[in-house]
Amino acid sequence: MYRRIDEGDFAGFAELFDENAVYHRPGGPPLAGRDAIESYYREKRTIADGTHTLARVLLSDGAVAVDGTFSGHLADGREQAHRFAEIFELAPGGLFTRRDSFLFVCDF
């Protein structure tokens, strides 16, 4: 999933979500629906490029928890680096129904 984001494959990334999925992210209202999630990444995301590096991925009872780091550039060219943690809920077929993101801004 993160590889798709890092490579700019936002359609492929959005396909991992249920049509009615909800994405709760820092600094903005929840994004409701697969189309809204893809539209956000294509049109409103303030990050221009970067790489996610995963430290842990935990799977338990229809949920996935991930933590790692991100390093890249904002749309205005400034460098951006932060730690993140995310929790995903899964539908029986494996698509994401919910994503909750948490960011920890830090110096690397």
Image (cartoon, rainbow, N blue to C red):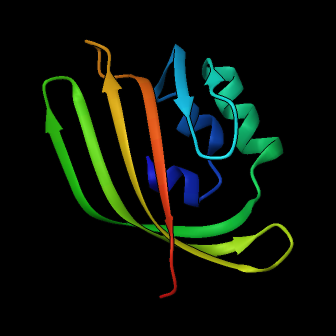
In which quadrant of the rendered view does residue 28 lie?
Answer: top right
Which residue does the image show at 45% across and 33% down from the upper left?
99
Q: Is residue 105 or residue 1 the one in the foreground? A: 105
Q: Tell me residue 83's x, y (percent).
A: 44, 67
In which quadrant of the rendered view does residue 35 lie?
Answer: top right
Q: Is residue 13 or residue 45 the one in the foreground? A: 45
Q: Tell me residue 96's x, y (percent).
A: 40, 25
Horizontally, residue 84 falls left or right of residue 31, namely left
Which residue does the image show at 75% across and 69% down from the upper left?
74
Q: In this view, does 77 lie above or below 63?
A: below
Q: In this view, does 15 lie above or below 4?
A: above
Residue found at the far right of this picture: 76
Horizontally, residue 85 falls left or right of residue 33, namely left
Q: Is residue 47 or residue 30 the one in the foreground? A: 30
Which residue does the image show at 27% across and 44% down from the upper left?
65
Q: Tell me residue 102's x, y (percent).
A: 46, 50
Q: In this view, does 101 lie above or below 36?
A: below
Horizontally, residue 55 falls left or right of residue 84, namely left
Residue found at the far bottom of this picture: 108
Which residue does the image show at 56% across and 52% down from the upper left?
5
Residue found at the far left of this picture: 60
